[in-house]
Amino acid sequence: MKFPIYDSEAPVLIAPSILAADFSELGAEIKRIEADADFVHIDVMDGLFVPNISFGAPIMESIRDKSDLPFDVHLMIEAPERYLEQFAKAGADGITVHVETSPHLHRTVQAIRELGCAVGVVINPATPLSTLEEILPLVDLVLLMSVNPGFGGQTYIPETTDKIRRLRQMINQTGKPIHIQVDGGVSAANISELWEAGANIFVAGSAVFKSADPAAEIRKMKAQCARS
Ligand code: DX5
Ligand code: ZN
């Protein structure tokens, strides 16, 4: 259950978001995706940075022993540095913080690393890639929001595809193994275009958990990205 390092030859990775799962039976919901998913994506919202409130570390801890998959924690909260240790102790394998929430991002990134977690940074649709320039060589993952964060079930913002392409070029220039993750409105209908643009980890909430067969949906998404 370790967070994998980016490998350009590796197949596509899928991170179903439990935000779209049935909260009254989270353990069972995770079991349904366990064999086909590559991560469990944990969307934490504080009702301040984003308009919605989801759940915190205690809920995540309660499902930690239900899965051997790495827990990929997306913190949509103000001043995320206050809660890093709590999420690490609750079983996070990777922690991703918004550039917009963290004026001392360098310190925050170091703190995540010191806790033994993979380090991710994320930007909203309106935040330019240039905000990542200095921090890029220090992270394991960049998450591009392809919807405005706060709610599941929104429509993919098409301009994100070109942003993925430009980010992959920036990453190539660093020479470091860095994942590009995309979050929001991803499904089997658009995944192959985003994969070809250079993203390799896909968060999917509604597409997976609102489907009749979540495991089959993940396999379908992966099939769209099979290397020829
Ligand atoms: C949005 C969250 C996403 C969301 C994705 O704020 O960060 O992870 O759950 O949901 P879908 O796949 O339904 O767009
Ligand atoms: Zn997310």
Image (cartoon, rainbow, N blue to C red):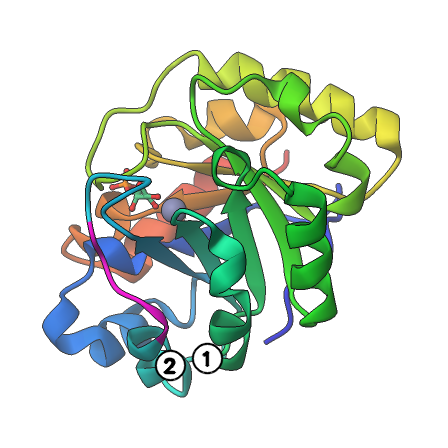
Return the residue at label 1.
90
Image-quarter location of ligand 1:
top left
**Side of 6 relative to 16 (left or right):** right
Nearest to N terminus: mark 2 or mark 1: 2
Q: Residue at x 52, y 47 (%)?
A: 97
Reply yes or no: does residue 105 show up in magenta. Answer: no
**Side of 193 relative to 189 (left or right):** right
**Side of 183 relative to 45 (left or right):** right
Percent position of residue 46, x then y: 28, 52
Q: Residue at x 48, y 40 (%)?
A: 101
Percent position of residue 203, x then y: 41, 46
- Mark count: 2
Q: Residue at x 67, y 71 (%)?
A: 115
Q: Mark 1: give few (<14), some (14-19) or many (20+) Cα within 10 Å.
A: some
Question: Which quarter of the rendered picture does the C terminus lie within?
Answer: top right
- Contact between marks 2 and 1 (CB within 8 A): the answer is yes
From the viewer's perspective, is residue 32 above or below residue 67?
Answer: above
Place residue 33 in its image quadrant.
bottom left
Residue 16 seen in render: yes
Return the residue at label 2.
61
Percent position of residue 150, x then y: 26, 39
Q: Residue at x 56, y 17 (%)?
A: 128
Residue range corresponding to the magenta coloring: 53-57
Residue 167 marker: none
* Secondary structure found at label 2: helix
From the viewer's perspective, is residue 87 above or below residue 223?
Answer: below
